[in-house]
Amino acid sequence: MSELQERSEGAVRVLTFARPPGNTLTTAFLESLRARVQSAGRQSAVRALVLESSVDGYFSSGMDLAELLSLPAPRRGESFQALVAAYRALLSFEKPCVAALSGSALLGGWVLAMACDWRVLGARAKISLAEIRVGLTPTPALIARLSQLCADPRVVKEMVLRGRSLNAEDALAAGLVDEVRPEEETRAAALAAAGKLAKSAPRAFSRIKAALNASACDAALWDRSVKEFSDVFAGAEAREGLAAFRDKRRARWEGA
């Protein structure tokens, strides 16, 4: 069975993440996601896009650390570049894009959700951008996007500086998600939201979306962010943080 499944619900294209147990994001998965988003954008019959998960408990738990750690050091930035490419494809998708977060969206999973226009979160799910816990940075571009979406700057600081995860109630209060539903209703609610948005005037919608996302599409900021991530990823803190995560122990920053 494909790790990234595709179907159509009328004019809505649905992409389903199916990589149990946590829908971790490999380079190949992210490249496939980017290609399918771009393909949907070129098809006139597709009026909206939904991202969803078939895995209980997770929309996505983030990057596949096993793959990251298996790569030689000079290539470890490739996974982040693939995440950036998929994120930017979603952000520049001219049609409505809805995230059905029936499970938790963590780290890279939340990055993909932030690129969508509408987010429906399950009542027991959480979101996070807690790269600091493994000695990494979300980068300036993603922190800027989180700040743009969030109604409370204090929540942004809690998430990126302390690695705080938000439950559904707090994510809704902060404006980071648009709806909270019982998990079993999340996918249907996302389809309904996509169907409604698909009825908008297409050209007007695309121009309004571009205006809303203009600051998040700055190429120079993305170039700086990719370089910063690569620099931090090559450092001792990231090596220690990722090793601690793999070994399920507390990171020892003093020796990093």
Image (tube, helix red, strand yellow):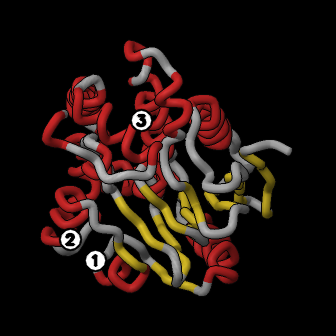
| First in residue order: circle 2 vs circle 3 | 3
- The furthest residue to the right: 1
Which SS class for mark 2? helix
Q: Which residue is mark 3?
A: 84
Q: Is residue 23 left or right of residue 106?
A: right
| First in residue order: circle 2 vs circle 1 | 2
Q: Residue at x 69, y 45 (%)?
A: 44
Q: Is residue 205 left or right of residue 56?
A: left
Quadrant of the snapshot with the C terminus: top left
Q: Quadrant of residue 106?
A: bottom left
Q: Which residue is mark 2?
A: 155
Q: CA distance from mark 3 to mark 1?
A: 24 Å
From what the image shows, is residue 191 above or below residue 246?
A: below
Q: Does the residue at mark 2 contact the one at mark 1 (Cβ under 8 Å)? A: yes
Q: Which residue is mark 1?
A: 174
Badge 1: residue crowd in 10 Å (few <14, some 14–19, many ≥20): some
Q: CA distance from mark 2 to mark 3?
A: 23 Å
Q: Position of residue 123 (x, y in %)?
A: 52, 84
Q: Amino acid at mark 3?
A: Val
Q: Position of residue 98 (x, y in %)?
A: 55, 63
Q: Amino acid at mark 2?
A: Val
| First in residue order: circle 3 vs circle 1 | 3
